[in-house]
Amino acid sequence: MVKDKPLNVIYGIDSKEHDTEGRCITVEYETFFVVNVYVPHADWNEQFEKFIKNLDSQKPVIICGDMNVAHKEIDLANPKTNTNSAGFSVEERDGMTAFLGNGYVDIYRHLYPEKEKAYTFWIYMRNARPNNVGW
């Protein structure tokens, strides 16, 4: 939902392989883009990064959604036991580090660099949410 009608709406990331999956919607305004995304897995990231760099060459980009990665150990309750789990693999974490290295900012961690136990996902077993054992 938006208050002001965008100049343009883009569905997908300019990828024949992924654009039928409905994972990304971009709205363009006069001075910026807003991208809402659900990232499925690490091999999707290269095409997504290329898409974002193209947008960013035109005007600033705001990315919202689910990047499906816990970037740092502080971002999950049990980092040691999840080292090889999807969403916390070395490849995924390195990919997010590289993505942010392009000048993008994880605004939550920028504002709250040391805040612990601030999760957005909990498994549905073992009382994870009531016990705040999350990601």
Image (cartoon, rainbow, N blue to C red):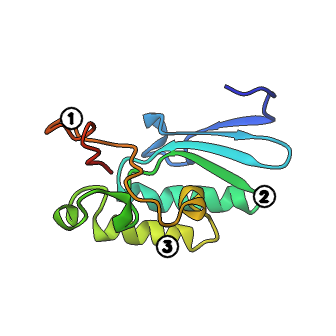
Toward the left, the furthest residue is 126
Name the residue rendered at 24%, 42% in the picture: 131
Q: CA distance from mark 2 to mark 1?
A: 42 Å
Could you say whether the residue bearing mark 2 is in a helix, strand or loop?
A: loop
Name the residue rendered at 28%, 65% in the picture: 89
Q: Which mark is residue 58?
A: 2
Query: Closer to us: mark 3 or mark 1?
Result: 1
User: Are the residues at dot 2 and dot 3 in contact (C-beta closer than 8 Å)?
Assistant: no
Q: Residues within 10 Å of mark 1 (few under 14, many from 20)?
A: few
Query: Closer to us: mark 2 or mark 1?
Result: 1
Could you say whether the residue bearing mark 1 is in a helix, strand or loop?
A: loop
Task: Name the residue that disc number 3 marks.
Answer: 98
Q: CA distance from mark 2 to mark 3?
A: 21 Å
Amino acid tagged 2: Gln
Q: CA distance from mark 3 to mark 1?
A: 31 Å
Q: Of residues 13 and 126, which is closer to you in this image?
A: 126
Task: Name the residue that disc number 1 marks.
Answer: 124
Could you say whether the residue bearing mark 3 is in a helix, strand or loop?
A: helix
32 horizontally vs 99: left or right: right
Task: Please tell me which of labels 2 and 1 falls first in the chain.
Answer: 2
Q: Quadrant of the N terminus?
A: top right
When asked about the image quadrant of residue 87, the answer is bottom left
Name the residue rendered at 52%, 67% in the picture: 99
Residue 42 point in image, percent of width and height:
36, 59
Residue 86 point in image, percent of width and height:
25, 56
Q: Which mark is residue 2?
A: none
Q: Residues within 10 Å of mark 3 (few under 14, many from 20)?
A: few
Query: Closer to us: mark 2 or mark 3?
Result: 3
The correct choice, above or below, for 10 with respect to 81 in the image is above
Amino acid tagged 3: Ala
Task: Please tell me which of labels 2 and 3 falls first in the chain.
Answer: 2
